Amino acid sequence: MSTDNITLLLHGGSGRLHPAGTPFPQEADYERTLAAAAQAGLAVLARGGSSLAAVEASLRLLEDSPLFNAGRGSVFSHAGVNEMDAALMDGATLRAGAVAGVRTVRNPITAARAVLERSAHVLLTGTGADEFAAEMGLETAPPAWFRTEERWQQWQALQAEKAHLVVLPPKYGTVGAVALDQAGHLAAGTSTGGMLNKRYGRVGDSPLIGAGTYANHVCAVSGTGHGEFFIRHAVAHDIAALMEYRGLDVATAAHHVIHDKVAPAGGRGGVIVLDRHGHVAMPHSTEGLFWALARAHRPVETNVCHMVVE
Ligand code: ASP
């Protein structure tokens, strides 16, 4: 047992960033919210909580914030509804839980944890997932809770253009977290509203174990970006496999999958990865990736700035 290595790394999505040196109006809000979420997760780890609990605690805060494309503030599907996906995985046991296409559970990441801990399954979808969450006594919320004016306007603009485009939200972002606890156990979680204007019933990479979310005894991974590519390339598991089977370090493995495999295929996005020693990597092929990193005895680091594509 050691408190020295405890780590909580989270992301707030990948995508376009404001050019270097031009702060955007909500920059401080994003920074503050990311830092608070990372700190909340670290506090769980500091008092001996599990990496699973820490990931959930961080992501609940980001889901409740209207700034991110997860929970409250999710993007709208083509049908004009919010359908959310989330997954949580425990690296020590390989137990996992996920929900896809939920509409009424306030915190999809908590529903994912309930699937992991209180069902015989890994992934529940749609009405079945919402009903399970309600049966488990999880808090529900009406459509108005998830709706933000900004996301509604983004959706309206696409309808006005009669576009059947499915696009990555023009702003941040899907949320994800990875954590290392005092017992040396890793966990990963991801939560998202998915892609703007997505087709009814579309499921992205975030709730799919091995695609957008994965954790084992070697590393924990959460992704963000164009989900269809992350599914095809089994991104999160591929990174873990490179580390486990080929002995690559966290930065080399993550960089290879994002830049040498997914990007050349046309898939843009990024990942956060944490290994069992507390080493981190957050490569991205988009202009930027929002992230926050909280470790023992150090100030929280955040990134909401312009970053050059690596
Ligand atoms: N990966 C998510 C999805 O495809 C979207 C995102 O990360 O922004 O559903």
Image: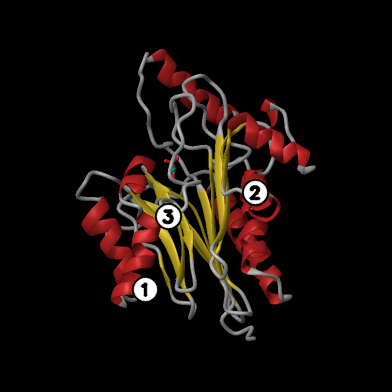
| Residue visible at 37% across and 15% down in the picture | 161
Earlier sequence position, callout 2 versus callout 3: 2
* Labels 2 and 1 touching (C-beta < 8 A): no
Q: Nearer the viewer, residue 31 or 118?
A: 118
Give the residue type at disc 3.
Gly
Nearer to me, 17 or 139 = 139
Residue at numbered disc 2: 115
Q: Pointer 3: what residue?
A: 210
Quadrant of the frame with the C terminus: bottom left
Is 259 positioned to the left or the right of 68 in the image?
A: left
Relative depth, front residue between 290 and 125: 125
Residue at 43% x, 45% y is 205
Residue at image position (63%, 54%) is: 116
Disc 1 target residue: 244
Q: Secondary structure at mark 1?
A: helix
Q: Amino acid at mark 2?
A: Val
Tell whether 164 sits left or right of 24: left
Q: Identify the residue shown where x is 49% and y is 28%.
A: 201
Q: Are marks 2 and 3 in contact (CB under 8 Å)?
A: no
Cα–Cα gap, marks 2 and 1:
27 Å
* Horizontal and vertical percent position of residue 263: 24, 50
Near mark 3 (Cα within 10 A), the count class, few <14, some 14-19 or many ≥20, is many
Three-letter amino acid code at the position of disc 1: Glu
Q: CA distance from mark 3 to mark 1?
A: 14 Å
Q: Is residue 61 above or below residue 246?
A: above
Residue 153 percent coordinates (x, y): 51, 24
Visible residue check, residue 266? yes
Looking at the rendered image, the quarter that the N terminus falls into is bottom right
